[in-house]
Image (cartoon, helix red, strand yellow):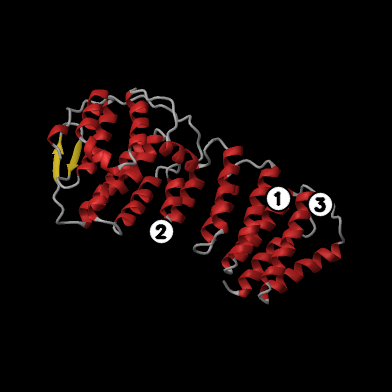
Amino acid sequence: MTTAKIQRIVARQQEKYTFPSTFKCPFSSASKAGSAKSNIDRISEGQFYEAHQQLRVVASRYAKSESWDAAIDLLYGGALALLKAGQGGSGGDLAIFLVDVLGKSGKDVSVAQKSKLLTIVRAFPAREPTRKRFVTEMISWSSRTGEYPLGDPELHHVAGSSFAEEREPYDAERHLALGTKDSPEQLARCEYEWWTQDEPNTAALYAARAIFPYLLVGNLRSANKAHLIFTSRLNSSNRSLSVQEVSSKSSDMRVYPILPLLNFIGLLLLAIQRGSSDLYKQLAKHYAPQVKEVGVWDDALAQIGEMYFGIRIPRQGNPLFDMMGSMMGFGGGVPKPKPKKVDVPPPPAADLD
């Protein structure tokens, strides 16, 4: 970002709120004007630390006097200017302060406030450590003041997409699993790219990371979408991979002779659509050796069995689900959707390896 642009951004924020009519300033107008000019000079001269500190002081005074709009706009403009100047630490600090002010102000999760926060998320330099804390605070604020107890889906989606673009899959998973209808595509692509760095026979492990989280929060539609995108990418990028198409009146499925666990996931999704506990038990029994070899699916599948097929599990510690709950921000109370019943003939599970 050019010095002139940084000057214009900060100047607009300082000029707009230098003398708000309702603000009873505890310090003189002359000192405020001098402070604004000083900030512009410091940024233009590359004195980012000094500018950051002064912006914090002025915003704190606005907040103390409950001039919330002034504080919010000043922090937003200052954070954005510093972030775009490559000052991730200072800009991130002002961004976190902005979320704190939003919380104290009682502002709702409006389009205007979300727009500010999403713009800041996108402005963070790659791998900037303070971004994760900012995202955590942002989601926490939206869960307290908005209509979504697990955090606003749009905020989750943009944060998760940013992490996915920078190949930080664990953070991407955490947010995209609670995102919007567009999130499954981002998550499936992220997991696919991650898989390309591993052994070919591990494809199902990465597909599951894009599918199981949606099933565990009761989002079958997104789970199906993630499965479709992952397998479509797998087919288009691996022309030599053997694939068989199995079709019925109401559903189609791709069968991979050398990837049995990927077949298991596809059949699991079909079983959920049918709501057939018998079919689920058949699948679990048939693929038990392969699932056991994976070693980390047992708890997730037990939860899925209880949620969608009514197969109760003992009430005891559940390491994987507890981990996902902590990761995604929810506790043990996952909504239990009613299994969908659709007219699909039983898939030929016993013939698939």
Query: Dividing the picture into quarters, in which one does residue 94 lie?
Result: bottom right
Label 2 neighbour load within 10 Å: few <14, some 14-19, many 20+: some
Looking at the picture, which amino acid does disc 3 mark?
A: Phe
Q: Nearer the viewer, mark 3 or mark 2?
A: 2
How far across and how far down the image is residue 153, in percent? 48, 42
Left or right of 227 on screen, residue 147: right
The residue lying toward the viewer, choosing from 231 and 290, is 290
Looking at the picture, which amino acid does disc 2 mark?
A: Arg
Q: Decide: marks 3, 1 in contact (CB < 8 A)?
A: no
How far across and how far down the image is residue 13, in percent? 69, 61
Q: Nearer the viewer, mark 1 or mark 2?
A: 2
Find the distance from the CA under tag 3 to the CA under tag 2.
45 Å
The residue at which mark 2 appears reads as 167
Secondary structure category for the residue under label 1: helix
The residue lying toward the viewer, choosing from 149 and 8, is 149
Tag 2 or tag 1, which sits nearer the N-term? 1
Looking at the picture, which amino acid does disc 1 mark?
A: Asp
Residue at point 44% right, 40% down? 324
Q: Which mark is residue 69?
A: 1
Secondary structure category for the residue under label 3: loop
Secondary structure category for the residue under label 2: loop
The residue at which mark 3 appears reads as 23
Residue at point 62% right, 62% down? 91
How far across and how far down the image is residue 322, in percent? 46, 37
Quadrant placement of the C terminus = top left
